[in-house]
Image: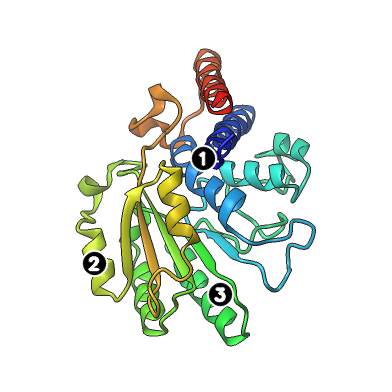
Amino acid sequence: MTEINRLKSIAAARRIDLLRIIRNAHGGHTGGALSSTDILVTLYYHTMRFKTKEPSWPDRDRFVLSKGHSVEGYYAILADLGYFPKAELDTYGQFGARLIGHPSVKVPGVEMNTGALGHGLPVAAGMALGQRLNGIDARTFVLMGDGEQAEGSIWEAAMFAAHHRLDNLVAILDRNGLQISGSTEDIMTLEPLADKYRAFGWAVVETDGHDFDALITLLDCKPHTSGKPLLILARTIKGKGVSFMQNVVKWHHGVPDDAQYLAAIQELDQLQKEAEQV
């Protein structure tokens, strides 16, 4: 099996996991979790350096899920990698459980509590600066949503990162074009996003956020541009992997019924089989 097909198979399996825990919990941010899965899979199963049995290993790469509401795929990945038992996924959303609707540092592998939008990039910039000051040859990755680009703290952090020439900081923007109440361009015009980040002093690359080959090439480049933080503007599809959820606003925070869940799992099972047969 090629590396690309290995990642495709893993991504299909993690999508199945995240749909299961959303279904069991009767709640979750389905569309955004599905749109970001391929990015997370590339980071965790190919690019990033970490030790699951030593989550605080000083030389690790760090990851911050700034769009913390789309946590289900993130939990599924951490469990599959061994940060905590996979059986614990079934406790998601239950009273007293560690696995709540936004990332928590009580969960092994999670670097910071997120959920209040616009906080991830500022903290990630601080982490990247700390890595440099401590002489650690590692990177900090942060995954942002496009709706949260309306937060002013994002742009303060963008200035900070460029000013400090944080070329060990990689920000990935899950640009699926939809937020809870509709199109991002109808709610708060964001474009031209790439030009805005370039004007703030960042290196910017636009790519297909579901193209594993392109993601590998970009994420493995270290650093991408000397002296500049990198923004990967990843064009994605909300609800990716489940045809009837794709680009449909209501699946931002939706729970499939029995028939929809079965159809989604069958579709993802087929995608996994196709990847493994190559």
Q: Quadrant of the N terminus?
A: top right
Q: Amino acid at mark 2?
A: Lys
**Residue 246 sits in which quadrant?**
top left
Residue 143 shows in the view? no
Residue that sits furthest to the bottom in the current view: 133
Identify the mark at residue 253; answer none if there is no mark.
none
Asked which secondary structure carries label 3, the reply is helix
Q: CA distance from mark 3 to mark 1?
A: 30 Å
Under circle 2, the secondary element is: helix
Return the residue at label 1: 4
Residue 196's tag is: 2
Q: Residue at x 51, y 70 (%)?
A: 124
Q: What amino acid is at disc 1? A: Ile
Q: Earlier in the sequence, mark 2 or mark 3?
A: 3
Sooner in the amino-acid sequence: mark 1 or mark 2 = 1
- The local crowd at label 2, few if under 14, some if 14 to 19, many if 20 or more residues have their Cα within 10 Å, is some
Q: How many marks?
A: 3
